[in-house]
Image (spheres, rainbow, N blue to C red):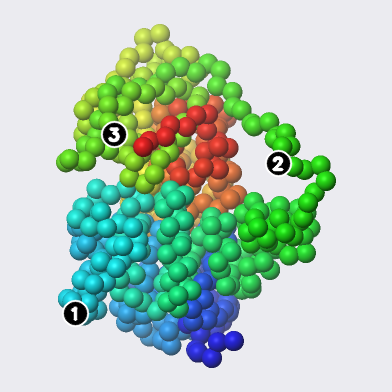
């Protein structure tokens, strides 16, 4: 049992966003010991990011809203300590690392936080080198931050916080933009800091299978205002969003939910009739009758100075199909997505079939023409090909959800309420008066996707769309993607191209996978 003071105490804490009547958290109590790894879990939109923002005083001192009760972090009350007064003990990495950068290059960003804390130059230089090596980004030290992939930016953001050596590290979906290998490396570094350095880590993560075996305690937000704290097995036995392994354990009515495949095998034991040579269930396939080419590239090349992100790519995409772009961080997936949309200067050609005159989405129009999205005005380009970027919030600029939907209706020249109807069909029931900045990452994605779909584009590009989504919402997104591709219901038949690191999502949703090296 620990004889030190708890690192974090929540005492009868209630949290409410400005403009909402229902509290996100109501009379919550929790205690995280020094050196623990605490995992925050719950469905998308239940308040995980909100809870994390309270731990360093961002809420209510910066983002507004109300917080009642006592939040004590490293012995300091956040009600009287502003974020700057907690910066030496709490380091925070948010869902969107780019939004937190204040310098231009990797090395400068890692040093910046230490400069603000008055750390001596000699110690700063030493810590910068150690952190670059720890996070495996030494080769990026001189790179401009804006030239990095989303996954690389995420690793730099974590490095910048670690360099200041805080007592508590708060991480909001730190591996959401990382490929599986990079994610494993980052989590290994984090668990090393917990086990060998004694750092306290509070981590919100939807991919629970990556970290549940390393967690000391879990804070579960069911979505009704409660906060339930217990050991991992106890929470996973009752939580509404759990990884496949936990779901299997509950289906088998195991006495205790295992936290790893190894534990599961030992608990279940040999099963008669099951073996490694058992015939697998037939994989689900998707129909794509009536497909035709709608997008093609010829010798497409994207360069950033001496760095070639996409090299002489020839590829064709068809309507009614879903394609996955996969590859390690920095392989050029996001660069290709932006080039397909026409926003990235590049050599070679990108051509989209302009089929506005066709009365039937399943057949190419008789007089269709191929156009380069860079050569048409923004309105036409949005109808031809639309992109939902990694940071969906970049496309949101109005003060309320209702205002965003109304603006999309006008820009797309569709009947009022169309975008709201699309948003509802995506399963996101968002209050019209809610500020988009107060939404979770998954809710922002749903809002931006509804806005983009209101233009009825022929090609839909999704860059890391499963970031911030729980298991249930990912399954729902997969169904939505198929509806878009097939033109089911009110959806316009389209080619859907998804850049993702989520192998399971790609396997369940897409027709083909293109791997970028």
Q: Residues within 10 Å of mark 3 (few under 14, many from 20)?
A: many
State whether residue 480 appears in this view: no
Question: Residue 276 has which mark?
Answer: 2
Comes first in the chain, label 2 or label 3: 2
| Badge 1 or badge 3: first in the primary sequence | 1
Query: Who's the residue at 22% across and 68% down the image?
Result: 111
Read off the residue under disc 3. 310
Q: CA distance from mark 2 to mark 1?
A: 58 Å
Side of 94 where 3 appears, left or right: right
Q: Residue furthest top?
A: 366
Quick one: quadrant of the C terminus? top left
Return the x and y of residue 352 as percentages of the image width and height. Answer: 34, 22
| Residue at image coords 53%, 71% | 38
Does the CB distance between marks 1 and 3 fall below 8 Å?
no
Residue in front for this viewpoint, 487 or 43 = 43
Give the residue at x 43% y 84%.
74
Residue 120, label in figure: 1
Is 441 placed above or below 89 here? Answer: above
Image quadrant of residue 289? top right
Mark 3 lies on a secondary structure that is: strand
């Amino acid at each position: 049992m620990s004889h030190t003071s708890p690192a974090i105490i929540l005492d009868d804490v209630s949290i409410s966003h400005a403009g909402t009547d229902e509290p996100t958290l109501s009379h919550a109590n929790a205690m995280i010991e020094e050196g623990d790894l605490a995992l925050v879990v719950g469905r998308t939109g239940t308040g995980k990011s909100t809870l994390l923002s309270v731990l360093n005083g961002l809420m209510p001192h910066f983002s507004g809203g109300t917080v009642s009760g006592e939040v004590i972090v490293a012995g300091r009350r956040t009600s009287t300590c502003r974020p700057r007064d907690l910066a030496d003990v709490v380091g925070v990495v948010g869902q969107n690392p780019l939004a937190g950068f204040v310098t231009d290059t990797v090395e400068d960003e890692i040093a910046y936080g230490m400069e603000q804390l008055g750390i001596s130059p000699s110690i700063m230089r030493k810590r910068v080198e150690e952190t670059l090596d720890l996070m495996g980004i030494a080769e990026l030290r001189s790179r401009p931050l804006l030239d990095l992939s989303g996954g690389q930016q995420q690793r730099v953001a974590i490095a910048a916080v670690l360099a200041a050596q805080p007592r508590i590290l708060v991480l909001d979906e730190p591996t959401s933009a990382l490929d599986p290998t990079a994610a494993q490396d980052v989590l290994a570094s984090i668990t090393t800091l917990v086990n060998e350095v004694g750092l306290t880590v509070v981590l919100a993560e939807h991919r629970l299978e990556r970290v549940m075996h390393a967690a000391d305690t879990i804070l579960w937000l069911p979505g009704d205002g409660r906060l339930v704290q217990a050991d991992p097995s106890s929470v996973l036995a009752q939580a509404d969003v759990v990884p496949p392994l936990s779901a299997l354990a509950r289906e088998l009515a195991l006495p205790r939910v295992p936290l790893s495949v190894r534990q599961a095998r030992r608990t279940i034991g040999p099963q008669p009739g099951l073996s490694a040579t058992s015939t697998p269930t037939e994989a689900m396939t998707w129909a794509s009758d009536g497909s035709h080419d709608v997008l093609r590239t010829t010798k497409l090349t994207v360069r950033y100075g001496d760095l070639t992100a996409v090299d002489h790519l020839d590829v064709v995409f068809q309507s009614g199909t879903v394609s996955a772009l996969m590859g390690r961080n920095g392989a050029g997936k996001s660069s290709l997505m932006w080039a397909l949309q026409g926003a990235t200067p590049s050599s070679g050609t990108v051509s989209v079939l302009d089929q506005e005159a066709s009365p039937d989405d399943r057949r190419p129009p008789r007089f269709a023409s191929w156009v380069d999205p860079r050569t048409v005005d923004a309105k036409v380009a949005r109808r031809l090909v639309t992109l939902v970027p990694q940071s969906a919030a970049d496309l949101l600029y109005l003060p309320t959800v209702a205002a965003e939907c109304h603006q999309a209706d006008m820009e797309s020249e569709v009947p009022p309420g169309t975008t709201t109807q699309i948003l509802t069909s995506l399963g996101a029931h968002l209050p019209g008066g809610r500020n988009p900045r107060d939404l979770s990452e998954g809710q922002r994605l749903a809002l931006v996707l509804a806005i983009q779909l209101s233009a009825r584009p022929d090609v839909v590009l999704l860059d890391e769309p499963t970031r911030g989504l729980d298991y249930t919402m990912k399954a729902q997104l997969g169904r939505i993607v198929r509806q878009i591709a097939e033109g089911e219901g009110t959806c316009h038949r389209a080619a859907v191209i998804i850049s993702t690191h989520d192998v399971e999502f790609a396997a369940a949703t897409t027709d083909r996978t293109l791997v970028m090296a």
